[in-house]
Every structure is written in C-alpha cells, then in structure tokens.
Amino acid sequence: MRSPGASQSRKDWPTFRDTSFRLYVKLQTDHTPVHLALLDEISTCYQLLHPQVLQLLVKLFETEHSQLDVMEQFALKKTLLDRMVHLLSQGYVLPVAHKCLEKLDTDISLIRHFVTEVLDVIAPPYTSDFVQFFLPILENDSIAGTIKTEGEHDPVTEFIAHCKSNFILVN
C-alpha cells in the first residue's frame, strides 16, 4: 500500500461493473467493505490521489444499485458518505464538501448524516472559505434543525457561535 503504483491500481479496483462487484457490495452493507477501507488508506497516504478517490466515491455514490433493496442502498450511500468524510478529514475539505452538498442529488437524511459526521471531525481554526460554505448549511433549519441537540454539547450551535464570533460574515 505504501507504493504509489500499487495504490493507483487498488484505487481503480472497485470500479469494475460486473455482477461479482454488485454481489460483493450486496454482501458487505453491514460494515465497511474492504475495497472502501483501502480507499481510506490510499487517501491517508497519498494526497495527490485525493481527486481520483473523490471522483471514484462520487461515481459509486451515483451508481444505481437496483439489485439492492432500499435500506441496503441507503446503508451503502451512508458508507460512501463516511468515506468522503474521511477524505475530508485528510485535508481535502472544500472539494469534498462541494461535491457532497452542492453537486449530489441527495436525500435530506443523507445530507444530515454527512453534516453530522463533518461536525464530528472538524475543529477550529476554520478557513474563511469553509465557513462561508458550511455556515449557511447549518443555518438552514431543514438540514440542521434535527441535528441540534438539547444539552451541553450541541455541535451545530457551537460551530455557528464560533463562526459568528471569529469571522466577519457577509450575506
């Protein structure tokens, strides 16, 4: 895995479209499939492969998996979003955020899942570009309304408060 050539070939491995891949995906929806764990490892070790890993994850996310029932498709999409959050945590923040929140035609519950996972992995300091992109999403009640928690630790409120106290926001 530490060899760039090997990583490149492993990155391309999940893209084949025959029935064995579809069967493999069907059998692996209860936990992270090995090929997606390999993508995590590649994105951790090789920053130059981040664009290709994101492209592959988006392609897998957008692929129709008609042989899976609705709940299995939903679980697979959540798993793929988790892989995108991992890629985001490796420093590929804005491209991942843009793909997940602007470009994908995604169910609102999957967007909430993505936002929740992102809030779990981020910490200050934030770039102004990230704040300008992510803050309006968290201020949208249809997305963040159900994410907010009652109690001591509310990541949505904490993020919004931090941004409003540390950034000059232009609407």
Image: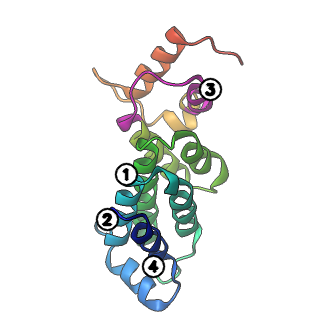
Mark 3 surroundings within 10 Å by alpha-carbon count, few (fewer than 14), some (14 through 19), many (20 or more) = some
Task: Indicate whether 85 appears above or below 130.
Answer: below
Q: CA distance from mark 1 to mark 4?
A: 30 Å
The residue labelled by disc 4 is: 68
Q: Which residues are magenta?
A: 119-137
Of the pair 34 and 100, the residue shown nearer to us = 34
The residue labelled by disc 1 is: 44
- Amino acid found under the numbered disc labelled 1: Thr
Q: CA distance from mark 4 to mark 3?
A: 37 Å
- Amino acid found under the numbered disc labelled 3: Gln
- Amino acid found under the numbered disc labelled 2: Thr
Q: Nearer the viewer, mark 1 or mark 3?
A: 1
Task: Indicate whether 23 appears above or below 40.
Answer: below
Image location of residue 162, percent across then percent down: 46, 15
Q: Nearer the viewer, mark 1 or mark 2?
A: 1
In the image, which disc is placed on residue 32? 2
Image location of residue 72, percent across then percent down: 40, 71
Task: Indicate whether 151 appears above or below 52.
Answer: above
